[in-house]
Image (cartoon, rainbow, N blue to C red):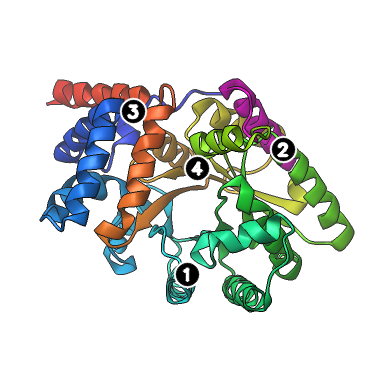
Amino acid sequence: MEKIFDNTQNAFTLKSDTELERAYFLFKLIDSQPLVRIGTAVTNFALKAHLPVEGLIRATVFDHFCGGVSEDDCIPVVDKMYTKGVSSVLDYSVEGKEDETAFDDAMNKTLKIINFAKEKKAIPFAVFKPTGFGRFELYQKLGEGQKLDTNEHEEWDRVVERFDKVCKAAHDNDIALLIDGEESWMQDAADNLVAEMMRRYNKQKAIVYNTLQMYRWDRLEYLKKLHQQAQEENFHIGMKLVRGAYMEKENTRAEEKGYKSPICASKQKTDYNFDDAVSYMMEHIDKMAIFAGTHNEDSSYKLMELMAHKGIAKNDFRVWFGQLYGMSDNISYNLAASGYNVAKYLPFGPVKDVMPYLIRRAEENTSVAGQTSRELSLIKKERDRRKGKN
């Protein structure tokens, strides 16, 4: 398999020299754990104290990792990326709001994005988080098999109704729908609900996609059980595969409560788990569709090799590669230049409301060995290339 991810000219083709310098500055900051901790604390304080810092945040970290404050604000970014064959997943990244009005707002936002996507080829997916549509504790209670009281039953019915309304709209408009994964202790209830949506709306092909966080050692087994159900009940499986986003929280909770951590014992085992799930899905691609959400170059090459081995066209709609906006452009743009289906997760929302997401993103980067240094080495390489060209 030809190695394509070192081509920085493709990777940063849309970045001006100024944007490249900003990226270098941001990743240098993220490369330092103490600076991330200090920056996080200072930013949180400044926002809570209503200090006039939103303009600075918007001009730096926000504009690098987010598409804008609204769907319309994202369109120039969406259109620009699509000129290079990279699609967008508009991701309303407001976290932590837990009331019925906020849940209805998130549902309506997702419905609006589905309508948006229907008119725009550059946006082939919509996405939402389960806790965007219902309370975390409610999922947890259901997943743990606890009895719901009358009010909670009615509350859960509203969650199911939100899921169904959005999944039906996605089905009716032929827009694939990614449903994010969250913490393990609420995920069982979400999994059951997403599987029900697959039964309803994935009869002809995968419209509804769940998310498997493969740093969990039990997820491949879950996929195989779901596949058995799908065969018996005749529906397609859509799955976004990622390594995962809540590792420290998962390990801490397991230690505090005295149960076995759901996280794989090592990074290598997580990598094997991810690649095994990709291989399993590719073996059964006739009834599955995969969104490989990964910043790992080796995993990307392995999927490319599997596609070539099985004679699956690079642009087969059942196989997508996905990365986050502002990261791993060397993977996204080189894959797109080679003809593969690629989509960037494009977060958006009011600056203040999106900050919890951005802080989590920075903290994750500091904990992933090699990710930030790889970004920096590629940016340096492109700076040198441009200077040599001028």
Label 2 residue SS:
loop
Dividing the picture into quarters, in which one does residue 38 lie? top left
Disc 1 marks which residue?
110
Numbered disc in front, either 2 or 4: 2
* Spatial CA span between label 1 and label 4: 29 Å
Mark 1: amino acid: Thr
Of residues 296 and 133, the one drawn nearer to the viewer in this rendering: 133
Disc 4 marks which residue?
339
Q: Is residue 173 above or below residue 88?
A: below
Residue for point 41% across, 44% down: 324
Disc 3 marks which residue?
375
Q: Is residue 264 magenta?
A: yes
Q: Would residue 143 be seen by someone viewing this image from the given angle?
A: yes
| Percent x, y of residue 278 | 67, 37
Residue for point 24% across, 23% down: 380
| Percent x, y of residue 107 | 49, 72
| Percent x, y of residue 186 | 62, 53
* Marks 2 and 4, the one that precedes in the sequence: 2
Dividing the picture into quarters, in which one does residue 223 lie? top right
Mark 2: amino acid: Asp
* Spatial CA span between label 1 and label 2: 30 Å
Q: Is residue 379 magenta?
A: no
Total count of labels: 4
Q: Quadrant of the N terminus?
A: top right
Disc 2 marks which residue?
218
* Spatial CA span between label 2 and label 3: 31 Å
